[in-house]
Amino acid sequence: MLINTFFIICAYCVGSLSSAIIVCKCWGLADPRTKGSNNPGATNVLRLGGKVPAVVTLLGDAAKGFIPTFLASTYLQDSWLIAGIMLAAFVGHIFPIFFGFRGGKGVATAFGAYFGLSLPVGACIFAVWAGVIWITRLSSLGAVCAALFAPIIGWLFLHNVAIACSMTFITIVLLIRHKANLYRLWFGKETKI
């Protein structure tokens, strides 16, 4: 039991490493929590510093979800522990202990976790996200649709209750984190790519 708690705490700490804040410091950019959209994510870093720091941020955020989940799904047998580790990395991104619990929305970290869990699951969820964006040019709508389909896709491929519960929780959190975007989408005010 103690070792399981240790694994979950480690995953949370990995998730708490805010890629956007670290990248902005390295590039000499403004704190993404206080400039632009005030969101420490890749899209805001793109606004503040351009493509290269944004891509580094995106990869960093995805890696935070991928690495703990991949290691857990590869080396552990307990599906509830794997689900907990995946969830801990995601929660760490949103509420990072190292950065005053002010994190990003969690989309890239969730994608990374899903790819770490299963390549087909991650690829299908990514396809939903990319397809919606390609059709609508609305990044937030792509994220919301991918979040909604994620637990269904996860269940279809894995048939695992623990993983399905974790993915459903991630979906709920992502929808809450996107409430302002949902409001703008509803009233047709969301900015297109």
Image: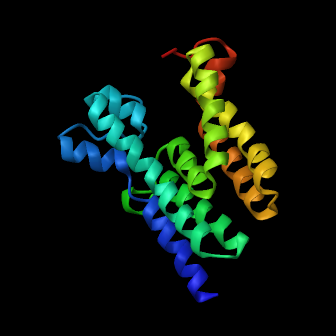
Q: Is residue 86 left or right of residue 20?
A: right
Residue 69: image quadrant is: bottom right
Residue nearest the viewer, comparing 55 with 157: 157
Return the residue found at the far bottom.
2
Q: Decide: is 14 above or below 130.
A: below
Q: In percent of the image, x 61 and y 19: which residue is there?
A: 184
Relative to 143, say whether 160 is above or below: below
Vertical comparison of 34 with 133: above or below: below
Point out residue 160 in the picture as x, y percentages from the top left corner.
80, 61
Instruction: Report the colour scheme.
Output: rainbow
**Residue 179 visible at all:** no
Residue at figure coordinates x 58%, y 80% from the top left: 5
Answer left or right for 177 relative to 39: right
Residue 1 shows up from this direction: yes
Name which residue lies at 56% across and 72% down: 8
Residue 84 spot, x, y in % from top left: 65, 67
Taking the spot 47% from the left edge, 59% from the top edge, the residue there is: 15
Looking at the rendering, in which quadrant would you find the N terminus? bottom right
Counting from the top left corner in percent of width and height, residue 23 is at 27, 45
Camera-side residue of 100 and 165: 165
Residue 119 location, x and y as percent? 61, 50
Q: Residue furthest left?
A: 28
Residue at the farthest front position: 120
Labels in figure, total: 0
